[in-house]
Image (cartoon, rainbow, N blue to C red):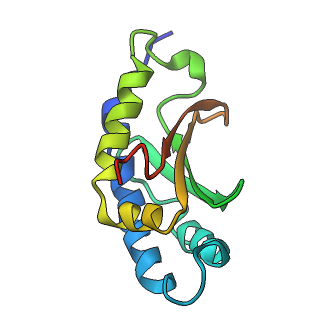
Amino acid sequence: MNRVVVWGATILAIILGGFIGKAVVGKLFGRGSPENELPRMVEAVKSKAGTKVDEVTRLDSARHGPGKRLVYEFTILNVETPKDLDPGVDLATVKQKIRTQACAIKGIQTILNHEIDVLYEYKAVNGEYLMDVDLTKAKCGL
């Protein structure tokens, strides 16, 4: 079985998160409390479901919770199962790279500054969990 290294390309997934974050923030904040806006934020993200972020990453859906959290759900299209990942990939390093880039996105910063945390979840094609990256004000230094 070939091992697949996908995480370099996956970092681009945060660009979509930033785009959606900016669009969602521009339309929703100011209309009510951030926690009351979460369902509408989720619907805005879901409207982009099926969008390929790059050659191997697809936005599948979004949800909110627990608490004030916006969750983006992604699939890595060239990883059939978690066993297909290269065991030499340092997921902690990958997560930190994604977090660093995501924290620099103005739309994500605005969401975090409204006390809403963001979580990126990644799964394999078969639906099995690969990893997640959590974004909070503290982790982003805001």
Considering only vertical position in the picture, is 43 above or below 130? below
Is residue 11 shown to the viewer in this render? no
Decide which of 123, 24 is in the foreground and name it.
24
Decide which of 37, 139 is in the foreground and name it.
139
Say which residue appears at 59% left-offset and 36% top-offset.
125
Considering only vertical position in the picture, is 113 above or below 37? above
Residue 69 relative to residue 2: left or right: right
Say which residue appears at 35% left-offset and 54% top-offset.
142
Q: Residue 31 appears in which quarter of the rendering?
A: bottom right
Image location of residue 98, percent across then percent down: 36, 40
Instruction: Give the farthest residue toward the bottom.
Output: 31
Image location of residue 101, percent across then percent down: 29, 46
Residue 70 relative to residue 16: left or right: right
Image location of residue 21, percent across then percent down: 42, 67
Residue 63 relative to residue 106: left or right: right
Say which residue appears at 34% left-offset and 51% top-offset.
103
Considering only vertical position in the picture, is 5 above or below 8? above
Image location of residue 102, percent across then percent down: 35, 50
Considering only vertical position in the picture, is 81 above or below 71? above
Is residue 112 shown to the viewer in this render? yes
Q: Residue 39 appears in which quarter of the rendering?
A: bottom right
Decide which of 105, 77 is in the foreground and name it.
105
Decide which of 70, 78 is in the foreground and name it.
70
How many marks are shown on the rendered structure?
Answer: 0
